Image (cartoon, rainbow, N blue to C red):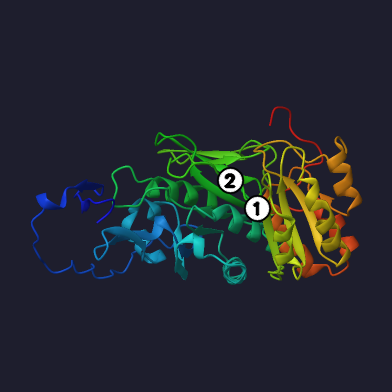
Amino acid sequence: MRDGMAVVKLDSGYNIGVPPASCTLSERPLPVPPKQLDVVQNRSLPTLAIVSTGGTIASRIDYRTGSVTSQFNASDILTAIPELKEIANYRTIPLATILSENMTPAIWQELARAVHAEIKNGAKGVIVTHGTDTMAYSAAAISFMIDTPVPIVFVGSQRSADRPSSDNAMNAVCAAAAATGDLGEVVVIMHATTNDDTCAIHRGTRVRKMHSSRRDAFRSLGVDPIGVVEYPSRKVSLATGAVRRGKRTLALHDKLDPHCALIQFYPGMSPDLLKAYEDYHGIVIAGTGLGHTGTALIPPLKQLVEGGTLVIMTTQCMNGRVCDRVYDTGRDLLDAGVIEGGDMLPEAALVKLMWVLANEKDKTKAAVLMQTDLKGEYMSRSAHGL
């Protein structure tokens, strides 16, 4: 029941609401899940690793509730999308079976170690299947934790496999094509348009989910996508600025400081709210416009800085950069010790702050690192019109 209506799951995968009085109760056994079959692969193709964390791309119907739930492992994905077997030979690692709102820094660390191990063991690329809601956070986290000589491709789907409009198969195929290509960095690959013709390749530190349900929900912010994958040809085209395969030497830097927070300022925000963060080592603020908060927040922010908390200012705007030297409020924030976050996305700034504070204990040096471009997250100059 929902909003006074009975929810019925159709064979098409969609749900409809009907008056309860029009329904007749009948009972039947729940469907038995199909037996897991061995996946026959072509060992002469390049070897890719699929690390599954769950999400809609790895979901199927839960007949108990009529909704979809994260249940598939990576082997199920190969069975469901046979075209993948034309591209590569796969190793599958079911790291987690969660929806992405349940992702944590501790799981990011497990993911980084698993991905690093697969590359060290000879994988020519790694595909990470992930829920879309927090995929941008995870892609940024892995970007900072791994120096990779091969593609690490995050992929998900906006619509589950039980729906005719599902984007899971095409996204997965385009991810596999890119993972065997010339990339050498962490990226997110999802539909570029509402049509089934192209997937965009987004840098892992510059991407955000911009729509709750559209198939082309993901956008690169402040920069253009670093490439595209055409479908069904699977042709991969990379932009000049994309990091190429083999440019970096494999290294794992998996320390994170979870005692960091992301706070969005809003009009009338009480300064008392900042008291909850007195024990935090770092805070990212998503401020308004050029990077502002209400003046009432400046004294408690100064107290946090004086107590040893590193405070980074970003902007809520989709594009542009922080510049706290234009208005009095910005200059007062700088005087309070707040660090400008440039054009970093708030979510990328948060995971970068976790990584920086875990690897650099000197706060002055940590502040310098936060204003240093490490993995394409911080540009000294914004691109025109972006």
Q: Nearer the viewer, residue 336 or 90?
A: 336
Left or right of 277: which side holds 25? left
Q: Quadrant of the C terminus?
A: top right
Examine the rendering and report whether any part of residue 236 can be seen.
no
Residue 362 x, y percent position in the rendering: 88, 67
Horizontal arrangement in the rendering, residue 85 relative to residue 107 (left or right): left
Question: Disc 1, disc 2: CB below 8 Å?
Answer: yes
Please provide percent x and percent y for residue 240: 68, 37
- The residue that appears at 69% across and 64% down in the rendered structure is 145
Quarter of the N terminus within the rendering: bottom left
Q: Is residue 9 visible?
A: yes
Q: Nearer the viewer, residue 314 or 303?
A: 303
Q: CA distance from mark 1 to mark 2?
A: 9 Å
Q: Earlier in the sequence, mark 1 or mark 2?
A: 2
Q: Residue at x 39, y 60 (%)?
A: 58
Direction from residue 215 to residue 165 in the image, left or right: left
Measured along the vertical axis of the image, is residue 119 above or below residue 179?
Answer: below
Q: Position of residue 319 (x, y in %)?
A: 68, 36
Residue at 68% from the left image edge and 55% from the top image edge: 263
What amino acid type is highlighted by mark number 2?
Arg
Disc sitting over residue 347 in the figure = 1
Residue marked by disc 2:
208
Q: Residue at x 80, y 46 (%)?
A: 295
Say which mark, if any, is on residue 328. Answer: none
